[in-house]
Amino acid sequence: MPSVEGLGPRRAALQLLDAVLRRGQTLESAAGRIAGLSAPDAGLALAIAGETLRRLPDLDLLIDSATRHRLPDDSKARMVLRTALAQKIALGTPDHAVVATALPLVDGGPRRLVHGVLGTLLRRGLPRVDKPKLPAEVEKRWTVAWGTAAVEAARRQIARRPPLDLTFADDADAQAYAIEHGGISLAPRHVRLASASVADLPGYDSGGWWVQDLAASLPARLIPADAQDVIDLCAAPGGKTMQLAAAGHRVTAIDASESRLGRLRENLARTHFDAKLVEADALKWTPDRQFDAILLDAPCSATGTFRRHPEVLYRARPKVVADSVQLQRELLRRAAKWLKPGGSLVYSVCSLEPQEGEEAVRAVLADHPELHIEAPAALPSFVPVSPEGWVRILPGLLQAEGGLDGFFMARLVRAG
Ligand SMILES: C[S@@+](CC[C@H](N)C(=O)[O-])C[C@H]1O[C@@H](n2cnc3c(N)ncnc32)[C@H](O)[C@@H]1O
């Protein structure tokens, strides 16, 4: 994305949306390229883009209700109107500021039209949109896969930022922290807080905890306690590596991304844990021995993380999901060969696409008769275990407590 040096936060927000919707980037990677904005302005740009993405279909319906001819999806006028309405609905920007900051962004485009649409909608009064529609194809897909209740829950969840989950190395520390800082603990070694700036939280520098959605903390809990030699395949930035190291396993952490491994290294340094780090493409790397357990937290469409990253719902087009599925099958096939007899392979994805979860496991079991599923024993009681023995976390679980990311995980055991 070109530098947006010298441009205001609202213009930067338009560029972020363009990077996400047209070029399939993540908000985080696009935001990393914003130059020339102060930290508060960059934060505002990200907030405007994020809040726009949380309710895009509803914003479009509003816009269409006030125009005689439908504005093209990628027209400047529609993009400016989307961000202007999101500011009013989600960020409480006053009407006059919404109009005054929107019009200069139309740059030689239909300013009168944009002015007219905004005036009409603001006079009418905007709805709160606290249960936004998901993109139509996602609603269709998830209704087929998970039913209307899960889609309804997802619509409630995407409207607001999720709470902040911390994982602790030590459960007594977690319980004490929850009491001291007004959090709740929903599982051993877990504390949930209302959102806050992470680096400002007490205890960040001393490294007793790390940020990790509660659902993302579950796969490492499936690794048997007595497994000594453990691979964390696709490990960076290392939330699960730290859990495994904290549980006393000897961990080899592998990832193909140098920059993400750098973050893993920093995380280990901050939390004072140790793991052997290997920068390698797991499709080419081969270990020199077999392992007691392997955690494969595979790259995926990440659609389960839509509460934090609403853009995933626009990026996860069928081709992206199909490519992920292919990579996951190959990673599973390779990892299955690296297990000792009796060893465990825990497979997980932060995806709400059954092809990346249930179907991936069915396929590996069909190809590897030496593997079978073993239902997890050591999970918190709220976690649903299917009759097949896997765990599928859907929107709606622990809704009253703030919900969880969508996830899938299963433990496959190699015959002894
Ligand atoms: C879902 S993320 C892992 C998150 C991590 N397990 C955690 O808990 O922090 C997937 C990771 O897979 C890595 N990856 C993707 N393709 C890979 C490959 N072929 N070999 C090794 N790592 C790969 C990515 O760099 C990314 O860090």
Image (cartoon, rainbow, N blue to C red):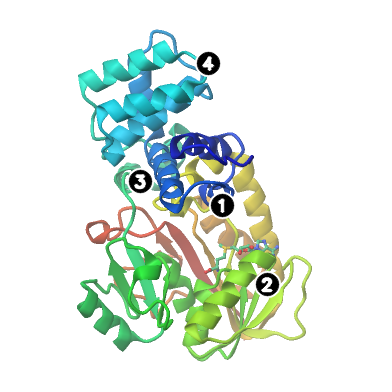
Q: Do the residues labelled 2 and 4 touch (CB within 8 Å)?
A: no
Q: How crowded is mark 1: few (under 14 residues within 10 Å), some or many (20 or more)?
A: few
On whether ligand 1 comes within 8 Å of the CB at mark 3, the answer is no
The residue located at (52%, 37%) in the rendering is 7
What is the distance, in whole Å, between disc 2 and disc 4 at their CAs? Answer: 56 Å
Q: What kind of residue is marked 1?
A: Gly
What is the distance, in whole Å, between disc 4 and disc 3 at their CAs? Answer: 34 Å
The numbered disc on residue 108 is 4
The numbered disc on residue 32 is 1
Residue denoted by label 2: 335
What is the distance, in whole Å, between disc 1 and disc 4 at their CAs? Answer: 29 Å
Residue denoted by label 3: 158
Q: In the structure shown, which secondary structural element does the residue marked by tag 2 occupy?
A: helix
Q: What kind of residue is marked 2?
A: Ala
Q: In the structure shown, which secondary structural element does the residue marked by tag 4 occupy?
A: loop
On whether ligand 1 comes within 8 Å of the CB at mark 1, the answer is no
Q: How crowded is mark 4: few (under 14 residues within 10 Å), some or many (20 or more)?
A: few
- Mark closer to the observer (2, 4): 4
Instruction: Provide residue 262's location: percent of width, then percent of height.
Output: 63, 71
* Quarter of the rendering containing residue 56: top left
Q: Which of 297 and 210 is in front in this view?
A: 210
First reached walking from the N terminus: tag 1 or tag 3:
1
Residue 234 visible in the displayed image: no
What is the distance, in whole Å, between disc 1 and disc 3 at their CAs? Answer: 23 Å
Q: Are marks 4 and 3 in contact (CB under 8 Å)?
A: no
First reached walking from the N terminus: tag 1 or tag 4:
1
- Mark closer to the observer (3, 2): 3
On whether ligand 1 comes within 8 Å of the CB at mark 4, the answer is no
Instruction: Provide residue 295's location: percent of width, then percent of height.
Output: 57, 74
What is the distance, in whole Å, between disc 2 and disc 1 at their CAs? Answer: 33 Å
First reached walking from the N terminus: tag 2 or tag 1:
1
Q: What kind of residue is marked 3?
A: Ile
